[in-house]
Image (spheres, grey):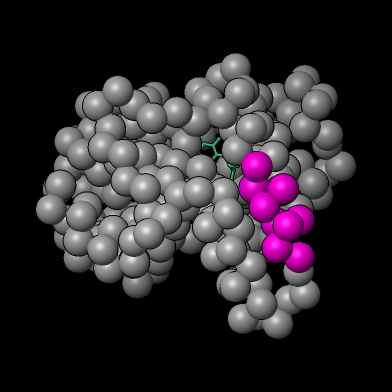
């Protein structure tokens, strides 16, 4: 087992931005587990499988092979051998990932992949259940959050910068819905591990949060 840094928190808290920077500074690999759930979600969408159809989702797992490669430090997600990195960042895939990840077969399907990476490398791994379920003995556990308003506003600015038309209130409603879905599901719900450090980034810059984590490590 390598050194393990577990970062959990709700959508839009900045987990991936922070995790990437911390991983680079420490020369650890960054494991984005959300991307794995998104790749499964893409498979479900492509095959017209509804998240509510638990049996079909379970069966789909047998046909959705997810593997991870690293190219120049960047995590590449392969779905049945196809690099799907550029296809999994849409809202549609995100909400399917949130719905599909409630299925225990999906979670079990990705568990080994996540554990194997943590066995092989020093990792900064982010997700919803890393500190609570996947890496319960992680040396450092962070629960990174921010108010739903701040998270919505960050997402709004991101989309606007890309020239995508969007509505701030709608984004905040989506974020709240996703939080509710991720926190109230039966299997591995999003929650702060008892031994995780709570970091609320609402009033912090990216550099502040990175410095805080480096100190904890
Ligand atoms: O972090 P993200 O937005 O890429 O994650 C997409 C969805 O995947 C999220 O809404 C819940 C699910 N997820 C999960 O259940 N467990 C994880 N460890 C990571 C993501």
Q: Nearer the viewer, residue 18 or 48?
A: 18
Residues in magenta, as a range: 167-176
**In the image, is residue 48 part of the stretch drawn in magenta?**
no
Position in image of residue 206 (x %, y %): 34, 66
**In the image, is residue 168 part of the stretch drawn in magenta?**
yes
Q: Residue furthest right?
A: 48
- Res. 184 image quadrant: top right
Q: Nearer the viewer, residue 187 or 216?
A: 216
Q: Quadrant of the N terminus?
A: top left
Residue drawn at (64%, 67%), measured in percent from left and top? 156
Residue drawn at (45%, 28%), measured in percent from left and top? 191
- Res. 120 image quadrant: top left
Residue drawn at (54%, 56%), measured in percent from left and top? 151
Q: Nearer the viewer, residue 154 or 131?
A: 154
Residue 32 visible? The answer is no
Residue 58 visible? The answer is yes
Judge from the rendering whether residue 88 lies leftward or rightward of residue 12; answer left or right: right
- Res. 56 image quadrant: top right
Secondary structure mostly seen in the magenta stretch: helix
Position in image of residue 6 (x %, y %): 31, 40
């Amino acid at each position: 087992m390598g050194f393990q840094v577990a970062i959990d928190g709700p959508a839009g808290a900045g987990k991936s931005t922070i995790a990437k920077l911390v991983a680079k500074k420490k020369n650890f690999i960054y494991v984005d587990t959300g991307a794995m759930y998104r790749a499964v979600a893409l498979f479900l969408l492509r095959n017209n499988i509804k998240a509510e159809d638990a049996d079909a989702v379970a069966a789909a797992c047998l046909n959705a092979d997810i593997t991870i490669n690293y190219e120049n430090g960047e995590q590449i997600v392969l779905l049945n051998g196809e690099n799907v990195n550029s296809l999994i960042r849409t809202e549609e895939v995100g909400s399917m990932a949130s719905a599909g990840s409630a299925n225990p077969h999906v979670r079990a399907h990705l568990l080994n992949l996540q554990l194997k990476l943590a066995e092989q490398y020093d990792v900064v791994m982010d997700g919803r259940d890393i500190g609570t379920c996947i890496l319960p003995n992680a040396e450092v556990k962070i629960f990174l959050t921010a108010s739903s308003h701040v998270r919505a506003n960050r997402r709004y600015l991101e989309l606007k910068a890309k020239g995508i038309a969007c509505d701030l209130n709608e984004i905040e409603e989506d974020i709240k819905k996703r939080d509710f879905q991720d926190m109230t599901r039966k299997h591995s719900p999003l929650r702060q591990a008892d031994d995780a450090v709570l970091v609320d980034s609402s009033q912090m810059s990216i550099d502040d949060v990175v410095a805080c984590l480096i100190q904890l490590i």
